[in-house]
Amino acid sequence: MRIFNTLTRRVEPLEPIEPGHVRLYTCGPTVYDFAHIGNFRTYVWEDLLRRTLRFLGFRVTQVMNITDIEDKIIAKAMATGASIGEVTEPFIRAFFEDLDTLGIERAERYPRATEHIPEMLAIAEGLQAKGLTYESQGSLYFRIDAFPSYGRLSNLERREIKVGARVDNDEYDKDDARDFVLWKGHREGEPSWDGPFGPGRPGWHLECSAMSMKYLGESFDLHTGGVDNIFPHHENEIAQSEGATGHPFVRYWMHAAHLMVDGEKMSKSKGNFYTLRDLVARGHDPRALRYLLLSTHYRTPLNFTFEALARAAGELQRFDALYVRLGEGARPAGRNDEFDAKAAAIETEIRDALADDLNVSGATGALFRLVREANAALDRGALPAGSVEELKSLLGRVDAVFGVLTPPEATLLDPEIEELVTQRTAARKAKKFAESDRIRDVLASRGIVLEDTPQGVRWRRAVAGAPPD
Ligand code: AMP
Ligand code: ZN
């Protein structure tokens, strides 16, 4: 596997510390609201990365944090009079539901910030012991000019660093390279924990250092997030972790470009966002969204439009149509060796494309070629049972990575739909065309597409939001 490493700005072979086992940390959601589909671009890509690593034979241990204490959560709690838990619990539940809706595999662990305060304090104390911090007005700050490699990940020039200037906010711009807060002194109305620096709460960055090192070790392989995480979040994580342990923190960093709307980053604060739930409520199929988010290379910004979503749904229908054909009727036994060899070569091509820094368009291009080859062979009656079985298992292997190619079971089997299709065929045979048209309309209103072929009527469920055939 070769990946683009943000730290070195090069594509490099991924060589985990323990051969064959990738330890992966992915920054997770801040649970003060529903995640938007921009966030899901990053999470879906991380799922593609995880699945690709497994496809290539790696074992993966993935940890994703849940940020359940942070400025925006506290602001919401204070505005509504709710407790922190009352603000976060519904959105933690919603987050896991959304992961399932999008077919995102579960990480091995989802640690919560509020359950790791002692680990965070231990790092802060370690930093203090090494002279990398100072206290001011009850808060503890990281002294960035005492950490010589500060700015390496985000390519900050030393001159941009403002010595002695502080920032208390969890999020800030690159122009604001300042000493950042590790522990925020207690403020009226805010939740707080006791600790060696007095009552207060952790800054956002500290949690990811504490939870990643606790579960993956002081040095681990791979850390990811969206490009907005590079500065300050990941830069600060490196400073805190390496400052405290004296060891290299993470060897490879990968970052996904943003999901955009009209040339701007999709974000809560700009108000230009959709949640997954918005799209599902408008009748869009989450499979189509997953496919749309996956199919642009992760380092290229992706502009979200409803036309692009409809196109993605249309492309999935081509896979669904093939699945339906592969499930049909009796076929002669045996194999088509020429076809099998072509299919095997395409699988290798898909594997190589994914192993090349997740070249998805290379992989999907090869996959569509396979769909065309398979349809052509089926048209010629040249795909015997053995080759069909092999093709199905090949598609299954590839779909362990994409997670969108296999139509849901209910899409393929539905006795009620089968019955209506049989009735329509009977009506047509009896030349009761008004009746057969009526049944066709009933089926269409339920999203069923019919195709009359020499082998009989074929039906499939339209992918919601796809343009008409
Ligand atoms: P947050 O909840 O803001 O910390 O974001 C969670 C994850 O979503 C982080 O990895 C962000 O980098 C990522 N993210 C936020 N906005 C976008 C966007 N418009 N496109 C892609 N990823 C995003
Ligand atoms: Zn993080």
Image (cartoon, helix red, strand yellow):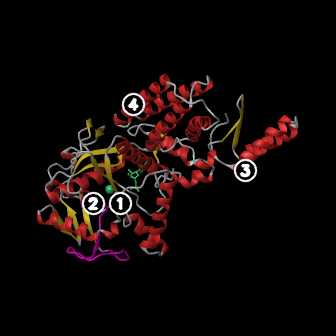
Image height of 427 relative to 209, above or below: above
Give, as a three-letter code, the residue at label 1. Answer: Arg
Q: Earlier in the sequence, mark 1 or mark 2?
A: 1
Which label is found at residue 215? Answer: 2
- The x and y percentages for residue 263 are 47, 40
The amino acid type found where label 2 is placed reads Tyr
List the residue tagged with mark 4: 348
Q: Quadrant of residue 252?
A: top left
Q: Nearer the viewer, residue 110 or 89?
A: 110
State left or right for residue 358 relative to residue 394.
Answer: left
Q: Which residue is mark 3?
A: 416
Give the magenta range: 187-215
Question: Would you say 61 lies left or right of 374 here?
Answer: left
Q: Nearer the viewer, mark 3 or mark 2?
A: 3
| Residue that carries the numbered disc 1 in the rendered image | 109
Single out the mark in the foreground, 3 or 1: 3
